[in-house]
Amino acid sequence: MTNKKSRVLSGIQPSGDLHIGNYLGALKQWVDHQKEFDAFYCVVDLHAITVPHDPAELCAKTREVAALYLAAGLELEHATVFVQSHVRAHTELAWLLNCITSLGWLYRMTQFKDKSAKYGADDAIFAGLLNYPVLQAADILLYQAEFVPVGEDQRQHIELTRDIAIRFNNTFGETFTLPEVMNPPQGAKIMGLDTPGAKMSKSTDSQLHAVYLLDTPDVIMKKFKRAVTDSFGEIRFSDDPERAGVNNLLTIYQAFTSKSKADIEAEFEGKGYGALKTQVGETVVESLKPLQQRYHELTGDQGYIDQVLAQGAEKAALVADKTLADARERMGFLPSKHT
Ligand code: TYM
């Protein structure tokens, strides 16, 4: 009998501002379950350069996202927090895996199809955008992660990671653990407040689309008050696309309060959409308060975050370098005498 904890790994891109979709789909479940797992959480900065980016912003956002991980409640005795590019093994394994990944697999990725459509012509789409899921597979496989806590939109990338691992293991011998998706019970797919038919996304120009983790209470209330609903006038959970706005508000409420669906529907029985929006808005404001306060405390001392990240990279590299060395050996690379 062994008490060894299962390994988990996940990451968030430091592009744009983190919103409540990122929080409910990923960050909150990392924090809620941190004691049960041997956890590795990285800020995936290398993924943030697959579309044109601003260097100064990348640097600032990388620190900001790391600070938000801690502000949300990740504790360093349970979780290793680091920056992806600080552990060189990620890029090296990504190359090795690129050489066993079929182009057809990559062209089929929904995220690639959506993002590349925005850039139009092939000349405006960089190879990194297509190869993005291979780097994600390297992130996961380097740590032999058994579970990957993410929102629903990442499922296809985790399935691809399994396909890549299976091909590697079959070709070169058993090397990688096959990871499984871990979705939160509620909030795996939060929709845009102004576009309840589409998931809440970081890359939008609309002021009313996403509630960001660092939004002020006034801004949060304003966004909820202007959230798109419908004309049915009924407050209940529903899969009907025409009721997606109200369903999304109820889902956000459920994810933040952990109340049952029946209790929530009973709570809003006979009430109007105005009351629903106010209640959800106030709940989100209150729930984010401790995170916002810790964030401001943490960022008061910039050196602290950098120190956490340096220690995290050191711990992560111990695991990642070992897996990379195994993969290199299995693929037949001459061992390097250079240290
Ligand atoms: P990213 O940065 O787009 O999103 C970070 C996390 O937030 C989740 N998420 C959502 N969950 C619920 N509702 C939404 N509207 C919503 N929008 C985003 C995402 O599912 C994700 O969990 N490719 C990844 C980053 C990545 C990664 C990894 C994840 C790189 N390497 C290794 C896991 C393991 C991405 O772009 O996430």
Image: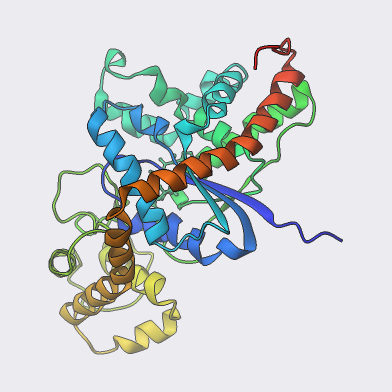
Residue 118 occupies quadrant: top left
Q: Is residue 237 above or below residue 24?
A: below
The answer to which of 282 and 235 lies nearer the viewer is 282
Q: What colour scheme does the image use?
A: rainbow
Image location of residue 24, percent across then percent down: 40, 61
User: Which residue is pictured at 23% across the width and 32% down the height?
Assistant: 56
User: Which residue is pictured at 41% across the width and 57% down the height?
Assistant: 70
Image location of residue 245, percent across then percent down: 26, 64
Asked whether the viewer can see residue 188, the reply is no
Image location of residue 321, percent across then percent down: 64, 30
Image location of residue 54, percent across then percent down: 23, 29
The answer to which of 197 and 222 lies nearer the viewer is 222
With 174 as the anchor, is 136 left or right in this view? left
The answer to which of 230 and 93 lies nearer the viewer is 93
Q: Is residue 200 above or below residue 164?
A: below
Asked whether the viewer can see residue 331, the reply is yes
Residue 208 occupies quadrant: bottom left
Q: Is residue 165 above or below residue 74?
A: above
With 39 as the anchor, is 150 left or right in this view? left
User: Which residue is pictured at 64% across the width and 37% down the height?
Assistant: 318
With 174 as the anchor, is 80 left or right in this view? left
Q: Is residue 35 above or below residue 262?
A: above
**Picture quarter with the N terminus:** bottom right
**Picture quarter with the C terminus:** top right
